Amino acid sequence: MAEETTREYAKSFFLASKLMGRGREESYALYAWCRELDQLVDGEAASGLTTDERARSLDGVAERLRMIFDWDSQAVPTDATYADLALYDATRTVQGFEREPFEDMIRGMRRDLEPNAGAFRTFSEVESYAYQVAGTVALMILPILTIGTNNANDFERRERGVALGIALQMTNIVRDVGEDARDRERVYIAEEDLKLFGGMTRDDVLSMQTPTFDYKCAIELQIQRALMYYAQAREGVVLLPLSSRLVAACIAGLYKRILLTVRENRYDNLNMRAYASKLQKLALLPVLVWGSIVGTNDEDGDMRLDFSDDSESGQAYRVAMCRIFVAIASGDDGDEEIARCADILREIKRGVPGKQPMLSRSRRFVEWYKSSTDFGTYEDERIKIDGGTIFHARR
Ligand SMILES: CC(C)=CCC/C(C)=C/CC/C(C)=C/CC/C(C)=C/COP(=O)(O)OP(=O)(O)O
């Protein structure tokens, strides 16, 4: 039953779970539990229920969760669902499950029921929500992925696992902006991030029909944020036993492909839903297999922005870079925009972060940003814009 739920609702995860050796049953149990929770808040089962009733369903799940962790099999509660029972079995066959991530996920679902759900002032609020609804899954599943290993590197593995969960959630957010706005009046992009681009607001996003230039830039910033988490997660793959690396690499690789497709769709996530085609998945596989062995799944050497500098100039650099990316991508008025942003970069003495992994493989990305227009040239020690192509200047 738990297996059927996974197959029906989560194609990418089902595919990845097929690669698991030991612990597959238990991972279906986790999925079924998470799915049931999601359904209680958002699914058909919840349609027609008031917010209070949904909150009460969550109370029930929380109560049963306490029992799952404290149960002895003599006293199985009568209202236990099949997902509860599957989770109960899993906690008895695999060592190391903790209750916190499950409780944190319930907290995330509660947040989704609040009147201001889908209104995030700062990115750090989005990040903590993404931890609650997705980062927690990594902590739930790590005991399965590390069956039979010792606990060395556990702290780092957990951090990196959570980063993958957040990257996946950010990908969902970026992919689903249109759907979330239309169907649920929600915008999971932080107000502070929107404001950076022409003073955009949540209401602007809610009423937008086709992406404006500023909107595309805000989406590029979200893509960049997601890429940062993917990069953090990538370093964690080698901390997993060999038998589990491919699962993590596949989930990351497939989702990252979806993220990059939003860019290839010229940031139109309002009218199009980005997905990875069968062919793309097939093409990814050898890269992911190789990556999972040597510890990288970076299929295209992304050009990534530096988020480490929180100062105003750090922010100005990110804004200018997003504007340059999008200006080159969309062509119109690219010249002026790039010249203006290049001036800003020159003033704050910033460029694309110096050391990029596998720069030579960023061709595809760069090619796509190429445009027929002549953008003139701009050069500093790190970035060179020449005829619409962004190069990393060689030192
Ligand atoms: C890298 C290391 C050290 C460990 C890996 C640990 C893992 C596997 C983490 C991934 C955790 C995970 C699978 C999180 C799921 C998060 C998420 C956004 C799920 C989306 O679920 P749905 O909303 O059903 O997806 P779709 O809408 O795409 O079907």
Image: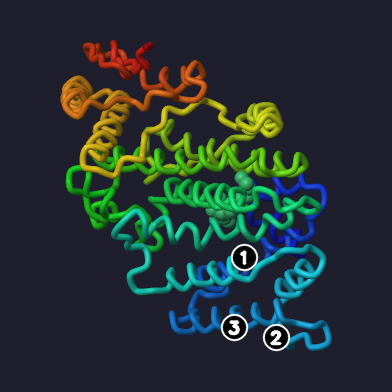
In this image, 30 relative to 338: left or right? right
Q: How many marks?
A: 3
Type of amino acid at the residue the image marks with label 2 = Asp
x, y percent for residue 259: 48, 39
Q: Is residue 169 above or below residue 288?
A: below
Does dot 1 land on a helix, a strand or a loop? helix
Label 3–label 1 contact, CB within 8 A: no
Q: Is residue 373 above or below residue 25?
A: above
Local crowd size for mark 2, using a 10 Å CA cut-off: few (<14), some (14–19), many (≥20): few
Which of the two discs, 3 and 1, labels the residue nearer the N terminus? 1
The residue where tag 3 is placed is 60
Q: CA distance from mark 3 to mark 1?
A: 14 Å
Identify the colour scheme used.
rainbow
The residue where tag 2 is placed is 79
Residue 247 image-quadrant placement: top right
Q: Nearer the viewer, residue 161 or 261?
A: 161
Q: Is residue 212 above or below residue 360?
A: below
Label 3–label 2 contact, CB within 8 A: yes
x, y percent for residue 265: 42, 34
Determine the residue located farthest toward the front in the rendered image. 152
- Please identify the quadrant where the N terminus is shown: bottom right
The residue carrying mark 1 has its beta carbon less than 8 Å from ligand 1: yes
Does dot 3 land on a helix, a strand or a loop? helix
Type of amino acid at the residue the image marks with label 1 = Cys
In this image, 183 relative to 192: left or right? right
Q: CA distance from mark 3 to mark 2?
A: 9 Å
Give me the residue at 42% from left, 55% from top: 127
